[in-house]
Amino acid sequence: MGSIAFFSVDTDFTLENEAWIRQRLAEIVTLEHFQLAHLNYVFGSDAYLLKLNIDYLEHDYLTDVITFDNATSPLTIDGDIFISIDRVRENATDFRVDFESELVRVLIHGVLHLLGYQDSTRDQIKIMRQKENSYLRFFVA
């Protein structure tokens, strides 16, 4: 089995229950018939993700998650997922959910991108939301 690592850059955020979350995310990869090589989650600020968005994607706007796929073979997960803790906090307030629930949704969302799910069209967004909601049940203690 591969590895999942969590880092914080430009924020004082610390993820709780890392081992338990790591196991749940690995289960999602397995259920989607992929093999986990390596996955990095990097938690940062709005400013940090905005810079990444501008520098690497030429998008000049705030976002909650940016995913970079580093896989060199099919059906393998090897990537970096950057998450704005500022965006997650604001979205939790906007969507009237607790911070932890919104964070888990974004953790899942990032790995779903690496699994090939997109969210550019209405149909893709519908499928992405269905997958998120389905996998959220893994995180209910």
Image (spheres, rainbow, N blue to C red):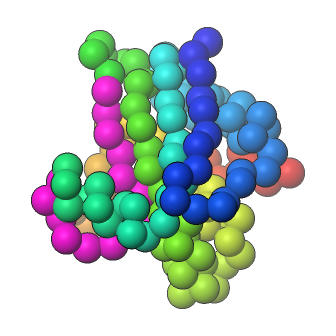
Examine the structure image and report whether residue 58 is included in the region drawn in magenta. yes
Q: In this view, does 63 lie above or below 69?
A: below
Residue furthest to the right? 141
Q: Residues in magenta?
A: 57-70
Image-based side of 36 in relation to 141, left or right: left
Residue drawn 79% across and 51% down?
16
Foreground of the two, 131 or 35: 35
Viewer-proximal residue among 58 and 100: 58
Who's the residue at 63% across and 56% down the image?
Answer: 104
Above or below, 88 relative to 127: below
Residue 18: quadrant of the picture: top right
Q: In this view, does 139 lie above or below 71?
A: below
Between 48 and 134, the one lying in front of the other is 48
- For residue 133: magenta? no
In this orientation, does residue 53 appear? Answer: yes
* Residue 63 in view: no
